[in-house]
Amino acid sequence: MAPPRASPGSPGRAPPRARSGHPLRRGRDAARFLPGCPKAGPAPRQTRKIGRIVCDEPSAQPRPAAGAMAPAVPQPRAATMFAPGAGPQPDPAGDRHQRRIRSFQPRRSRVTQAQRQALERLWPRWGIEIDGLSRLDLRALFSGRPVVLEVGFGMGEATAEMAAADPDTGILAADVHTPGQGNLLRLAEERGLDNVRVANGDAVLLLREMLAPGPALAGVRVFFPDPWPKSRHHKRRIIQPEFVELAASRMAPGALLHCATDWEPYAERMLEVLTASPSLRNAVPGGGFAAARAAGRPATRFERQGLAKGHVVHDLLFRRLP
Ligand SMILES: C[S@@+](CC[C@H](N)C(=O)[O-])C[C@H]1O[C@@H](n2cnc3c(N)ncnc32)[C@H](O)[C@@H]1O
């Protein structure tokens, strides 16, 4: 995983995202393609879509004519669309348009042929677009199994390992990283896993808009989130009081929030934030950090990179209070 770099532009001024196409490519420019948008200007250099995979090369395709339908995005199975006019309800965690600081940085990453093929073949079956518009029916998606949300699975090797080790638990794995999504789909198929679903987009949006407040999740995992080491980027760190309360509001009583990091100052801050949460209790007897690689967590790719640099890993285990 590339280390975080300075954020491009001002995140505070970004307009709400358009809701079609791949999130890595549907930012500022996408709004100008919306039919009837008064700000529609000359067509910028476009990326080319092959299925849901986006290539970096420029395209000669004209922008869609007014009224033209956007290319169909595979809809998640078992997602319920809201009735017209209903839409996502206000949430104590805030409206999606208020949340402009993101914990990830969109990257142009190379998708290998194997990842591309896995995406083309398996996305319609196991992929979920985080569009913020549909509610997920986790019971239907995971055949009634308890479901754990993994936020930021990277290349997905550890996710596949955890899914294989615990077939009775469903893993809803969210990330914005296209190559990782392809890789996890490929691993799931190779290992015959039917308890993994891959969600494309911001896990915060998924939690806030696509899961109703209530005991939906049996756990939330945040393994080696981007550390955003510079103080001016700390606001981008995902473990913040607001995120923790949002996650807790979708967790069943007793569900585990499991975080891990190899970045010492972030570990200290995580412990502070999680300990201060009125919804959680430290599951480690006596408080503090858990033994590294707690609760059967396999080593992750990012963890291995940190260990090679001599970093110390901290796991944090907090349970949802009743
Ligand atoms: C440092 S990597 C760690 C990946 C993996 N957990 C590991 O340990 O190897 C962090 C990952 O979190 C993803 N990420 C960050 N914020 C996210 C968010 N709000 N929703 C979904 N994924 C996110 C990034 O795209 C990246 O793949």
Image (spheres, helix red, strand yellow):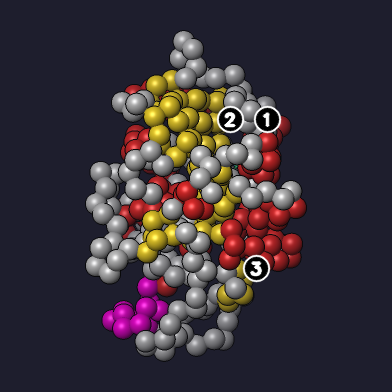
Query: Residue 221: x and y, percent?
Result: 52, 37
Whether residue 257 sits left or right of residue 321 in the image: it is right
The residue carrying mark 2 is 262
Query: Residue 138: x and y, percent?
Result: 47, 49
Relative to 231, does residue 152 appear above or below in the rendering?
below
Could you tell me which residue is drawn at 74 percent across and 48 percent down? 191
Give the number of the disc on residue 188. none
Tell me whether circle 2 and circle 1 mark residues in contact (CB < 8 Å). yes
Q: Could one spot residue 92 in this view of the protein?
A: yes
Q: Of 62 and 200, which appears nearest the observer? A: 200
Could you tell me which residue is drawn at 40 percent across and 34 percent down? 252
Task: Of the two numbered discs 1 and 3 on the same chain, state the one appearing first in sequence.
Answer: 3
Residue 81: quarter of image: bottom left
Task: Of the two numbered discs 2 and 3 on the same chain, state the one appearing first in sequence.
Answer: 3
The residue carrying mark 1 is 307
Looking at the rendered image, the disc whose residue lies closer to the viewer, 1 or 3, is 3
- CB at mark 2 closer than 8 A to ligand 1? no
Cα distance, mark 1 to mark 3?
Answer: 35 Å
Tell me whether circle 2 and circle 3 mark residues in contact (CB < 8 Å). no
Local crowd size for mark 2, using a 10 Å CA cut-off: few (<14), some (14–19), many (≥20): many
Whether residue 102 sits left or right of residue 171 in the image: it is left
Image: magenta residue range: 31-41
- CB at mark 1 closer than 8 A to ligand 1? no
Could you tell me which residue is drawn at 39 percent across and 68 percent down? 18
**Three-letter residue code for mark 3:** Glu
Cα distance, mark 2 to mark 3?
Answer: 34 Å
Magenta stretch: residue 34 in it? yes
- Identify the secondary structure beneath mark 2: loop
Query: Residue 298: x and y, percent?
Result: 67, 33
**Three-letter residue code for mark 1:** Leu
Q: Could one spot residue 28 in this view of the protein?
A: no
